[in-house]
Amino acid sequence: MKAMLMMSPGGPEQLVCSEVKTPSLSSPTDIKVQLMAAGVNPIDTKIRQRGLLGPGPLPAILGCDGAGIVMEVGSAVDRFKVGDRVWFCHGGLGLDPGTYAEWTVLDQRWAAPMPESLNFIEAAAGPLVLITAIGMLRDRGRLEAQKTVLIHAGAGGVGHVAIQIAKHLGARVITTVGPKDHEFVKSLGADETIDYLREDFVMEVNRLTQGLGADLVIDMVSSEVFSRSIHCTRAFGDLVTLLDPGPVDLKEARLRNLRIGFELMLTPQLRGLEAARLHQVEMLNFSADLIARGQLKLKVGQVLPLFEAAKAHGLLEESRVLGRVVLEVNSSSKAPPF
């Protein structure tokens, strides 16, 4: 099969299109999936730059997000049959092969039925960001109806789905965006927008909340944004980040009695936490239900063929895409559902 291989840590040129052995079933509960599309995530670019997170050898196939068709099933598979359409977040970290390839094999437990209304391109854009957003809002952040949430980078991959999920949960949403993205995030349900280039988000959030701050703040931007966000999080509120904030003065966070949480949706894969991985599959099913009801949409900003994975990485690193970047593995991936 064709696959994009990461040859060694470095720049996008380290992604090389190669012919590799097609994987085969190794367990009775495995399914073999013909990949139709693969999502591209910031974690892919970081792994390419710095090295694999697991002990697997190089060269390696990157890519966590996938969508495709089940073409073969193990003798004990009872959740899927040949022809089923699935989406999942699996592999690409240095443990199991990733999704920048024409085929993959995974245990049936880690896949979920694709939303019927989505094509493969749209579905491949979803798993990692959906799991991350739900984890930040619902699991770490304990967001409830009538609460106020500040979502940084609302036009980004995680941000644009987080806005929609927060609105489904009944929250008031404030989000920071660039000057061109206000209408986009408002179309997703954002109640107030802050131009992070022209406005002081701390002052604006405090103004919009009568000086109290947001009940929940989620950050996926930087240590500086995390540190400043402390000053616009409500007393006894939650501040959740995707990042390692580095050295931060937590005196004000302590005075506010904040709960500070971290969301790394890769942990269940990296640590072999089966129950947590099954919980993530439940998140995909929850998301599929919202999609079916028209309450959640995935924004795909750029679609490139598999062999242009290096270009896709470059676009992500330059922050030149609104929404998600997806690799088209099979030319029929944009076809309507069966």
Image (spheres, helix red, strand yellow):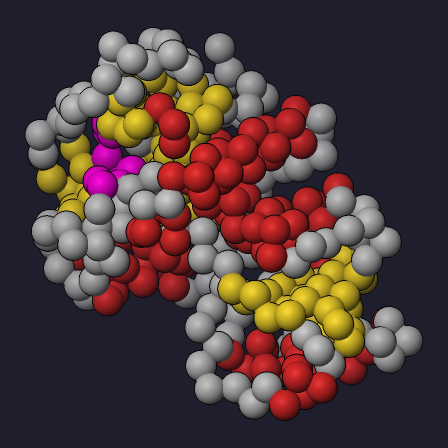
The question of residue 101 being in magenta is answered with: yes
Image quadrant where one finds the N terminus: top left
Does 149 sit above or below residue 249? above
Front residue of 173 and 56? 56
Q: Can residue 315 be seen in this view?
A: no
Query: Residue 266 at x, y = what percent?
Result: 39, 51
Q: Quadrant of residue 205?
A: bottom right
Q: In which quarter of the image is residue 174?
A: bottom right
The question of residue 126 being in magenta is answered with: no
User: Which residue is pictured at 25% across the width and 58% down the height?
Assistant: 53
Left or right, 196 with reference to 158: right
User: Which residue is pictured at 9% across the width and 34% down the height?
Assistant: 19
Left or right, 205 with reference to 58: right
User: Which residue is pictured at 38% across the width and 63% down the height?
Assistant: 317
Q: Residue furthest right?
A: 210
Q: Can residue 269 be seen in this view?
A: yes
Does 152 sit above or below residue 92? below
Left or right, 228 with reference to 106: right
Front residue of 119 and 112? 112
Query: Residue 12 at x, y = what percent?
Result: 24, 59
Front residue of 23 and 259? 259
Query: Residue 4 at x, y = what percent?
Result: 20, 43
Q: Which secondary structure class fits the magenta region best?
A: loop
Report the number of numbered marks.
Answer: 0
Does 64 sit above or below residue 316? above
Q: Give the range drawn in magenta.
A: 96-104
Front residue of 188 and 285? 285
Q: Quadrant of residue 327?
A: top left
Query: Residue 31 at x, y = what percent?
Result: 29, 20
